[in-house]
């Protein structure tokens, strides 16, 4: 009799130590809710972090490109008689602003044989369409050296005449939605969309010189399709220099 009572007591204690199916299902549901909430919070945090990093990279690239263009424009040389120094700014013809500018500035170029020197170069900025992404462009920079080569650069290692320096072109930035330039006319004090110092003028007329300032506007598209405007206005201090008189 005592053995039966002891066995029943141990069996009852064993039953109370386990979990019922209902308790397991409730615990699993609560755990699932907690994990889903934690996953959602972490997922939103990661998405926000990636979005912030992409936006920071976009803003840094936009500011750097706009300031680079402005810095080179600031050193644009005024047109002088008897050479090919020009400043040409042309508006784009498409729906999106796709202007271009071409000017002469002093740059540094790397030559074969680890030689480098400064010189005048024809620098241009323009937009090339991106085939894989309609409506977007790549910002293209090109420079063509105009300065005559130094005596030790006129021949190659074999003594043959060295070829003239080739134009250097590179894409500065992609995801560009537009590029716009405006030019301050020092005569009227107003902004214009076109500038050309290579136009022919009538005898006795003052030949065109550099604009007083250039308004640079660069438009970049983010991953969500938003457009961001990066711009600056740069003065052209060499505009005040008088052209070299003809001999």
Image (cartoon, rainbow, N blue to C red):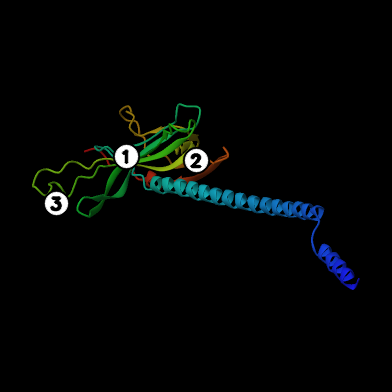
* Residue nearest the observer in this picture, 130 or 189: 130
Q: CA distance from mark 1 to mark 3?
A: 29 Å
Relative placement, left or right, of 246 versus 75 is left
- Mark positioned earlier in the residue sequence (1 or 3): 1
Residue 79 image label: 1
Q: Which quadrant, please, contains the N terminus?
A: bottom right
Residue 152 image label: 3
Residue at the location (47% across, 33% down)? 133
Residue at the location (83% across, 62% down)? 15
Mark 3: few, some, or many residues within 10 Å (few <14, many ≥20)?
few
Relative placement, left or right, of 203 versus 193 is left
Mark 1: few, some, or many residues within 10 Å (few <14, many ≥20)?
many
Residues tagged 1 and 3 counted as in contact (Cβ below 8 A)? no
- Mark positioned earlier in the residue sequence (3 or 2): 3
Q: Which quadrant, please, contains the C terminus?
A: top left
* Residue nearest the observer in this picture, 18 or 23: 18
Does dot 3 land on a helix, a strand or a loop?
helix
Residue at which label 2 appears:
217
Does dot 1 land on a helix, a strand or a loop?
loop
Give the percent coordinates (x, y) of residue 168.
30, 42
Give the percent coordinates (x, y) of residue 44.
65, 50
- Mark positioned earlier in the residue sequence (1 or 2): 1
50 lies above or below 15? above
């Amino acid at each position: 009799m005592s053995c039966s009572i002891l066995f029943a007591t141990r069996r009852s204690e064993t039953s109370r130590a386990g979990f019922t199916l209902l308790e397991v299902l409730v615990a699993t549901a609560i755990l699932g809710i907690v994990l889903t909430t934690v996953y959602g919070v972490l997922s939103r945090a990661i998405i926000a972090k990636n979005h912030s990093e992409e936006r920071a990279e976009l803003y840094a690239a936009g500011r750097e490109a706009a300031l680079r263009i402005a810095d080179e424009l600031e050193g644009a040389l005024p047109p002088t008689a008897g050479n090919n120094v020009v400043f040409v700014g042309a508006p784009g013809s498409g729906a999106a602003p796709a202007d271009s500018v071409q000017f002469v500035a002093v740059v540094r170029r790397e030559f074969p044989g680890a030689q480098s020197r400064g010189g005048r170069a024809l620098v241009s900025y323009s937009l090339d369409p991106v085939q894989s992404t309609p409506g977007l462009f790549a910002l293209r920079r090109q420079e063509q050296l105009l300065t005559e080569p130094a005596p030790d650069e006129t021949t190659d290692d074999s003594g043959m005449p060295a070829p003239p320096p080739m134009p250097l072109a590179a894409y500065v930035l992609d995801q560009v939605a537009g590029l716009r330039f405006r030019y301050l006319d020092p005569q009227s004090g107003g902004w214009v969309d076109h500038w050309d110092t290579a136009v022919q003028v009538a005898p006795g007329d003052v030949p065109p010189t550099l604009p007083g300032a250039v308004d640079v506007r660069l438009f970049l598209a983010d991953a969500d399709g938003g457009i961001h405007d990066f711009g600056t206005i740069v003065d052209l201090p060499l505009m005040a220099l008088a052209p070299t008189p003809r001999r």
